[in-house]
Image: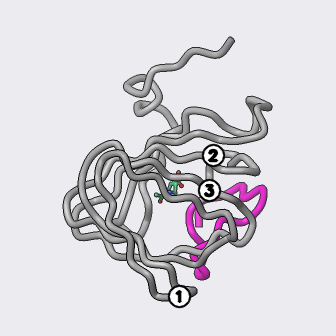
Amino acid sequence: MIVRHLADAEKTSRKIVSPDGNWDSTRLLLKEDNMGFSFHITTIYEGADFQMHYQNHLESVFCMSGEGEVESMIDGKKYPITPGTVYILDKHDKHTLRAFKEMKMACVFNPPLNGKEVHNSDGAYELDAETIA
Ligand code: 9YT
């Protein structure tokens, strides 16, 4: 069994602050844990408005607090995000995320992140990224 606490993990290199100023994320479970997925608690800062495209990963995101929206860049549909909303990028969907109030999200990635990833210029994470861009 693995047991960790968010408050402890936030004091370690598990916490990544995005260079673009849109989010930070504490990666509680990583590739090295051999679970087949990674699990992160991510804060999207109020006013954030940015595009992502996880070409190498599938992702599910559950909103625990805050308010925002996610827009599919495939069909332009916008979906409100409130506590309890889950959005699931089952088709590597290119999307824009907006936070009207700071949002706390629980995120799962398959394949798992190794822990150092930040978005590349396409809004993707490289597989087995080893350095912070
Ligand atoms: C909502 C969201 O941005 N999910 C991505 C996970 C987070 N940015 C991370 O841990 O890299």
Contact (Cβ within 8 Å) of mark 1 with mark 2:
no
Badge 1 element: loop
Q: Nearer the viewer, residue 114 or 69?
A: 69
Q: Residues within 10 Å of mark 2 (few under 14, many from 20)?
A: many
Mark toward the start of the polypeptide (2 vs 3): 3
Taking the spot 50% from the left edge, 52% from the top edge, the residue there is 61
Q: Is residue 130 magenta?
A: yes
Residue at which label 2 appears: 115
* Image-based side of 52 in relation to 36, left or right: left
Between the residue at mark 3 and the residue at mark 1, the CA separation in whole angstroms equals: 19 Å
Q: Nearer the viewer, mark 2 or mark 3?
A: 3
Between the residue at mark 2 and the residue at mark 3, the CA separation in whole angstroms equals: 15 Å
- Asked whether mark 2 and ligand 1 are closer than 8 Å, the reply comes as no
Task: Give the quadrant of the N terminus.
Answer: top right
Residue at which label 1 appears: 75
The range drawn in magenta is 118-133
Q: Is residue 46 magenta?
A: no
Residue 59 tag number? 3
Amino acid at the residue labelled 1: Asp
Badge 3 element: strand
Contact (Cβ within 8 Å) of mark 3 with mark 1:
no
Badge 2 element: loop
* Image-based side of 2 in relation to 36, left or right: left
Q: Is residue 30 above or below residue 54?
A: above
Amino acid at the residue labelled 2: Gly
